[in-house]
């Protein structure tokens, strides 16, 4: 399984290839138009010895790895391509419609799982940030309730504001009218 990096317009390793310790190769979509089409049109794509010449990068991969055929299914969730799941064969092969349909169901489930994992990670990061902010507010609140020394209160407010915003420095300036 490889993930799609929209900004770089390339596929990047995501999961180790089965039965190996190697990551899938990084693949620029500019050199693999059939994969770009699969990702952008959300449709399966296949390549065999007859069509490999159209994709030099894929042909090189097939030649060096010993595979002769590649069949790729896009991982699509909420109308967005997240990556591909690819099946490789050492001998020329045509995939029956039933196999393609079953593989697409697996790809759809994998896409949903990947998207859920990404959403969980983002939510977890946001919760950690929010929790840190709340701790800072609690610290400031505690200081406000425990002292009436203005310098201590201002120092605590600046420290927590700098920490919460990841600023390099903070400053409080009082205006004496």
Image (cartoon, rainbow, N blue to C red):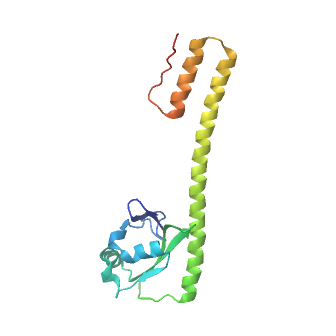
Report the residue at 45% width, 26% height from top. Answer: 169
Give percent across and percent down for residue 7: 40, 59
Rendered view: 132 above or below 114: above
Rendered view: 173 above or below 104: above
Report the residue at 48% width, 21% height from top. Answer: 171
Asked if residue 89 shows in the view, the reply is no
Give percent across and percent down for residue 163: 52, 30
The front one of 51 and 134 is 134
Q: Looking at the rendering, which quadrant does residue 135 occupy?
A: top right
Asked if residue 131 shows in the view, the reply is yes
Give percent across and percent down for residue 4: 45, 64
The front one of 159 and 14 is 159
Rendered view: 34 above or below 83: below
Give percent across and percent down for residue 102: 59, 81
Q: Residue furthest right?
A: 145
All told, the count of numbered labels is 0
Q: Looking at the rendering, which quadrant does residue 143 occupy?
A: top right
Q: Is residue 64 left or right of residue 105?
A: left
Report the residue at 66% width, 13% height from top. Answer: 147
Report the residue at 55% width, 68% height from top. Answer: 79
Rendered view: 136 above or below 117: above
Q: Is residue 15 left or right of residue 125?
A: left
């Amino acid at each position: 399984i490889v993930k799609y990096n929209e900004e770089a317009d390339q596929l990047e390793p995501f999961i180790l290839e089965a039965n190996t310790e190697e990551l899938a190769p990084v693949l620029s979509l500019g050199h693999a138009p059939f994969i770009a089409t699969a990702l952008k049109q959300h449709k399966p794509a296949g390549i065999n010895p007859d069509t490999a010449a159209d994709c030099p990068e894929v042909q090189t991969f097939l030649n060096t790895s010993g595979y002769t055929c590649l069949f790729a299914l896009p991982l699509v969730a909420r109308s967005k391509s997240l990556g591909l799941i690819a099946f490789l064969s050492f001998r020329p092969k045509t995939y029956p419609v039933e196999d393609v349909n079953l593989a697409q169901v697996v790809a759809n489930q994998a896409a949903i799982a990947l998207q859920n994992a990404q959403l969980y990670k983002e939510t977890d990061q946001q919760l950690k940030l929010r929790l840190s902010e709340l701790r800072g507010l609690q610290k400031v609140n505690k200081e406000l309730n425990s002292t009436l020394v203005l310098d201590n209160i201002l120092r605590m407010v600046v420290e927590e504001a700098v920490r919460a915003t990841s600023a390099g420095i903070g400053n409080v300036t009082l205006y004496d009218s």
